[in-house]
Image: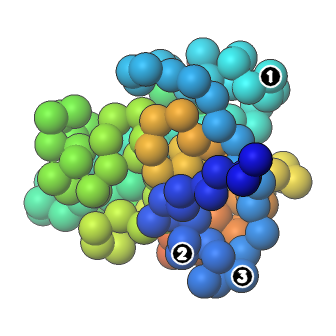
Amino acid sequence: MAKQKETKTNAMRILDTMKIPYRHLTYECPEFEDGIQVADMLGLPHEIVYKTLVTQGSGGAYFVFVIPIEDELDLKAAARSVGVKSVEMVPVREINAVTGYIRGGCTAVGMKKQYGTRIHQSARDLREIAVSGGRIGSQLLLSPWDLARASGAEFADLVKHP
């Protein structure tokens, strides 16, 4: 029996072109689940699974933030990290038009355009993190430093602290 060929996402093709190593994990998911449910389905520790959030700045530019799944984006800290007055979350209905990805499959690598991107500083200390692979049912495990290189990201403090 022939092995079924894996369909690569745009993010995976970019990582391959850049010769960035990653592991691809898949899970069955008919519709979007939140990052915590995805981590649980894959048996991954919540601390290494990150979500990708898309915002629009006060000047109209878009920005991407990659933060741990259990945390909440601090909009003021996020805005400071990209040098704008304020940012607000992009409505779900606009995510595809802005990024080329859909909710639950959005990743910082391979969006329609290169947006200012920040990864939460906690990722710097991890050997690998898991992020969406570019479609629902797909996760990529890779070095946070490699994710930063592939997405043009910098590290910053981005989450609300208790």
Asked if one can make out residue 56 in the rendered structure from this viewpoint, the answer is no
Q: Nearer the viewer, residue 23 or 5?
A: 5
Asked if disc 1 and disc 2 are in contact, CB closer than 8 Å, the reply is no
Residue position for label 2: 14
Residue position for label 3: 19
Residue position for label 1: 43
Closer to the chain start, of discs 2 and 3, is: 2
Closer to the chain start, of discs 1 and 3, is: 3
The answer to whether residue 150 is above or below residue 31 is below
The residue lying at 55 percent from left, 50 percent from top is: 133
- What is the quadrant of residue 59 in the picture? bottom left
Closer to the chain start, of discs 1 and 2, is: 2
The local crowd at label 2, few if under 14, some if 14 to 19, many if 20 or more residues have their Cα within 10 Å, is some
- What is the quadrant of residue 53 in the picture? top left
The residue lying at 35 percent from left, 64 percent from top is: 111
Q: CA distance from mark 1 to mark 2?
A: 26 Å
Kind of residue sitting beneath label 1? Gly
User: Could you tell me residue 22's position as x and y percent?
Assistant: 75, 61
- Secondary structure of the residue carrying tag 3 is loop
User: Could you tell me residue 32's position as x and y percent?
Assistant: 41, 23
The answer to whether residue 14 is above or below residue 30 is below
Query: In the shown orientation, is residue 46 left or right of residue 53?
Result: right
Q: How many marks?
A: 3
Identify the image quadrant of the C terminus. top right
Kind of residue sitting beneath label 3? Lys
Asked if disc 1 and disc 3 are in contact, CB closer than 8 Å, the reply is no
Q: CA distance from mark 1 to mark 3?
A: 27 Å
- Secondary structure of the residue carrying tag 2 is helix
